[in-house]
Image: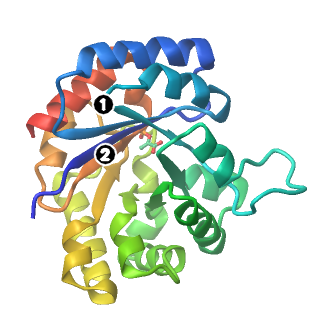
């Protein structure tokens, strides 16, 4: 079945409100005619309001890079789902490998965040992926399978169907190393099969699976042309208007 591509730019800890406004306005101008792709920008928390304002009425929507699972309370430095929906943002990234690596995220906390996001009506982008060491040890499917089972635990079929999965091999993030289209496709097919086994053919056919890991203008089209790759989560190449706009166009053409 045809799934609409979703290309999201994860800005990580880059761009304050002023720069965010400038970039979103630039992307609006460059990409106004691109309707075949869901275009998402993911600025830091303090730039979300600026992004939402600058994107209003356009084909660009906004994602947060994380959220906390509690509704409110004594969690210094954290942001709740309701705070995000009030802006409003549309998507939220959950379980990015940098969160797992630097901030101790586990499949359990990913699952708690996912529950909170879905309950609030946010669309989660849940990241999974193996390290270089795990790939070399032949553990890619075991690791990704475990992250999927733990992260998506307790979700019903409609919730899984509406969640975006981002397969991001850790060894390819920010390193300039990209999984080959064949390597990426193989893991995407594995993820889709795992969802088929747990939630049936319709959920598996509809769920969107992004690839992330050094996606650039030059490799986007070939990656997106793979049968089970439905978009990209892009870090470095999403930070400038020209790069990201060209990447989205190439992906749409792939
Ligand atoms: C990411 O941050 O999710 C990512 C894939 O980064 P990069 O595109 O820079 O590898």
Q: Where residue 8 sits: x, y (%)?
A: 38, 40
Which residue occupies 20% across, 37% down? 219
Classify mark 2: helix, strand or loop: strand
Q: Please, what secondary structure does the residue beneath circle 1 have?
A: loop
Q: Is mark 2 within 8 Å of ligand 1?
A: yes
Q: Which is nearer the eye, 167 or 30? A: 30
Q: Is residue 14 visible?
A: no
Q: CA distance from mark 1 to mark 2?
A: 17 Å
Q: Residues within 10 Å of mark 1 (few under 14, many from 20)?
A: some
State the mark number for residue 59.
1
Q: Residue at x 21, y 51 (%)?
A: 180
Residue occupying the far right of the picture: 74
Q: Could you say which is closer to the camera, residue 72 or residue 24?
A: 72
Look at the picture and state if 52 lies above or below 106.
Answer: above
Disc on the earlier residue, 1 or 2: 1
At 23% across and 21% down in the image, what residue appears?
32
Q: Which residue is tagged 2? A: 232
Q: Residue 6, can we see it?
A: yes
Estimate the x, y position of residue 10 in percent, counting from the top left: 47, 37
Ligand 1 - quadrant of the structure image: top left
């Amino acid at each position: 079945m045809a799934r609409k591509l979703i290309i999201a730019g994860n800005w990580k800890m880059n761009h304050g409100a002023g720069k965010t406004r400038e970039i979103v306005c630039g992307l609006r101008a460059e990409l106004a005619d691109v309707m075949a792709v869901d275009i998402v920008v993911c600025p830091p928390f303090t730039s979300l309001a600026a992004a939402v304002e600058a994107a209003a009425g356009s084909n660009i929507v906004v994602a947060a890079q994380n959220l906390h699972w509690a509704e409110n309370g004594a969690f210094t430095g954290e942001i709740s789902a309701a705070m995000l929906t009030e802006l409003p943002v549309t998507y939220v990234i959950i379980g990015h490998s940098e969160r797992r690596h630097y901030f101790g995220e586990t499949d359990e906390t990913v699952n708690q965040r996912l529950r909170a996001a879905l309950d609030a009506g946010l669309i989660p982008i849940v990241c999974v992926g193996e390290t270089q060491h795990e790939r070399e040890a032949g553990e890619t499917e075991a690791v990704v399978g475990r992250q999927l089972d733990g992260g998506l635990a307790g979700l019903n079929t409609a919730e899984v169907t509406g969640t975006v999965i981002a397969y991001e091999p850790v060894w390819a993030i920010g390193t300039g190393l990209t999984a080959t289209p064949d390597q990426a496709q193989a893991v995407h097919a594995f993820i889709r099969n795992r969802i088929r086994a747990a939630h049936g053919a319709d959920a598996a056919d509809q769920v969107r699976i992004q690839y992330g890991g050094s996606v650039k203008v030059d490799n986007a089209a070939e990656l997106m042309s793979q049968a089970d790759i439905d978009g990209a989560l892009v870090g470095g190449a999403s930070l400038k208007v020209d790069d990201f706009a060209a990447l989205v166009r190439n992906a749409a053409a792939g």
